Every structure is written in C-alpha cells, then in structure tokens.
C-alpha cells in the first residue's frame, strides 16, 4: 500500500511541477517546497481530479432550465478541470436537480502564456461563442457563467463582448481566484456577480502564495446558494 502511494506520488510529480505555473513568481522550486505543494494537493484531492481530466458538454444535449458555462484554470485538464469546478457542479446538481442544469466547459488551451495575456484570446472567444449558443439554442434557459483563475479572466473577456440582449439573459456570474478581481464582468450588474478571492491568494490579491488559490472547492456551497437565489 505504502509502496503504491509512493509510486503514485512519483507519477504525479510532472503534474506538481506543472500545477501552479500561473503562480510563476511565487511558485516554490526547492524539493521541500514542491513536497509541501504535493502534500497539499494530495490532502485536497486535487490530483485525483487532475488525472480524471473532467469534461462537461451538456450544451450539446436537451435544453435545461439553467445553463452553466464554466472556464477552468491554467493547466487544469479536460474542459472543466479539477475539484474547483467539480465541487460546484456536484453542489448545484444536488440543489437544483441534475435535470434542471446543463453544464458546459470551455475547451481552451489554459496555458501560462494565456494567463499572462490576460486570459487566452481564443479561449475567450470560445466562451463568448458558447454563451451566445446557449442563448440562441435555448431561448428560455437562464444562463450562469463563471470560472476559476484564468477561467475568470475568460469570463471577463467574454462578458465584455456580449450584446445587451445576451447580457440580459445572464442571471449570475461568479469568479474564483480571479486575476481581474475588483473589475466588473462586462455590463453585468454587480447584484448578479459573486467574485470570491481568498486572503493570501496571490493571484487575486497580489500577495501570499498558492495554497489559498488551490482550495476554492470550499466555496461551492456559497456559490450554489448565490446561483439558486437567481434562477
Ligand atoms: C478540445 O478541442 C480539441 C480540438 O478540437 C480536441 O482535440 C479535444 O479533445 C477537446 N478537449 C476536450 C476536453 O473536449
């Protein structure tokens, strides 16, 4: 068992090295510091989620009462990434009923370069297109948009390009660890916006480290309550 765990940890090392590159300046490089990041990730269940490479493509299916367009953070796999999104989708499906919410990930490259550009431009366009697609395909669905880290940047960029008519279809917006924390999401009113930034999260506050940027799964219930009150 112990042997298996050690083997798994070694197998995970490439992921650890790649895990917080959106934290460039702050990313610890010493073996001790990497180990600390590793332990944190294992404790938080991050790596199981990472390896699962989660995807959500429900916009392709039948229209539902609520449509969530979600953009993952830098380096996360699949189209919705790890436990930040997973915790939220689980809580939302439990609260609203799985039949009432369609979850659609934004498929984009999620590289560090994209983060440094203020959110991958192609990914921002993909998210913009998905929001428009939800609005036209499902005329009565209530649209929720949001993202984690670079995914929140995409959410800002996509929201800024929406027409007034499509903006009006959006009932709630959320951000986790948003590098653009404090800015509006296009012309979506603040009353529809919940942007969560942890004290000590270097990405949204400019000081601290990666630990408080890696635990937004803790906020799933809060965002779910916010969304449920608006759909
Ligand atoms: C994202 O799009 C690319 C190119 O179309 C495709 O190869 C890849 O499988 C997609 N990834 C996901 C998670 O849907």
Image (cartoon, rainbow, N blue to C red):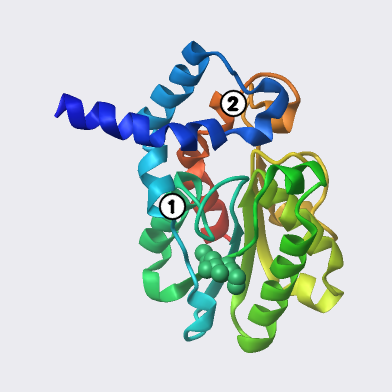
Q: Position of residue 100 (x, y in %)?
A: 44, 74
Residue 40 is left or right of residue 122, and the answer is: left
Residue at the left extreme of this rendering: 1
The answer to which image quadrant residue 171 occupies is bottom right
Other-residue count near label 2 (Cα within 10 Å), few / some / many at <14 / 14–19 / ≥20 = many
Q: Who's the residue at 27% across and 31% down the image?
A: 7
Q: Nearer the viewer, residue 221 or 5?
A: 5
Q: CA distance from mark 1 to mark 2?
A: 19 Å
Instruction: Specify whether residue 90 is in view.
Output: yes
**Would you place residue 230 above or below residue 21 in this image?**
below
Task: Tell me, for residue 133, which label it has, or none.
Answer: none
In the displayed structure image, the side of residue 160 where residue 41 appears, left or right: left
- SS class, disc 2: loop
Residue 109 position by quadrant = bottom right
Please give the label number shown on residue 86: 1
The answer to whether residue 149 is above or below residue 77 is above
Task: Identify residue for label 2.
Answer: 210
Q: Name the foreground residue: 58 vs 99.
A: 58
Query: Number of marks in the image?
Result: 2
Say what secondary structure mark 1 lies in: helix
The reply, left or right, for residue 149 in relation to residue 223 is right
Closer-to-camera residue (20/190): 20
Within 10 angstroms of label 1, few (less than 14), some, or many (20 or more) residues? some
Q: Are marks 1 and 2 in contact (CB under 8 Å)?
A: no
- Tell which quarter ligand 1 is in: bottom right
Q: Position of residue 182 (x, y in %)?
A: 80, 39
Q: Residue 116: image x %, image y %?
A: 79, 41
How far from the left and from the top, in percent, is residue 37? 48, 23
- Residue at 52 percent across and 82 percent down: it is 60
Report the mark closest to the observer, 1 or 2: 2
Name the N-terminal-most of marks 1 and 2: 1
Q: Which residue sits at x=73%, y=55%?
A: 154
């Amino acid at each position: 068992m112990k042997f298996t765990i050690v083997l798994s940890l070694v197998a995970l090392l490439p992921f650890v090295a790649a895990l917080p590159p959106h934290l460039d300046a702050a990313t610890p490089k010493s073996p001790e510091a990497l180990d600390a990041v590793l332990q944190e990730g294992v404790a938080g269940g991050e790596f199981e989620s990472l390896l699962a490479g989660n995807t959500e493509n429900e916009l392709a299916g039948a229209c539902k009462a609520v449509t969530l367009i979600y953009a993952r953070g830098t380096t996360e796999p699949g189209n919705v990434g790890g436990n930040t999104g997973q915790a939220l989708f689980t809580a939302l499906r439990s609260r609203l009923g799985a039949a009432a919410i369609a979850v659609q990930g934004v498929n984009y490259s999620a590289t560090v370069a994209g983060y440094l550009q203020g959110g991958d431009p192609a990914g921002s366009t993909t998210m913009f297109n998905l929001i428009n697609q939800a609005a036209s395909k499902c005329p009565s669905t209530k649209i929720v948009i949001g993202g984690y880290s670079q995914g929140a940047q995409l959410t800002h960029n996509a929201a800024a390009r929406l027409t007034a008519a499509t903006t009006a279809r959006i009932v709630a917006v959320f951000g986790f660890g948003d590098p653009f924390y404090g800015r509006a999401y296009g012309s979506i009113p603040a009353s529809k916006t919940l942007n969560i930034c942890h004290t000590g999260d270097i990405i949204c506050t400019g000081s601290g480290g990666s630990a408080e940027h890696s635990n937004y799964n803790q906020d799933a219930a809060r965002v779910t309550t916010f969304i449920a009150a608006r759909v």
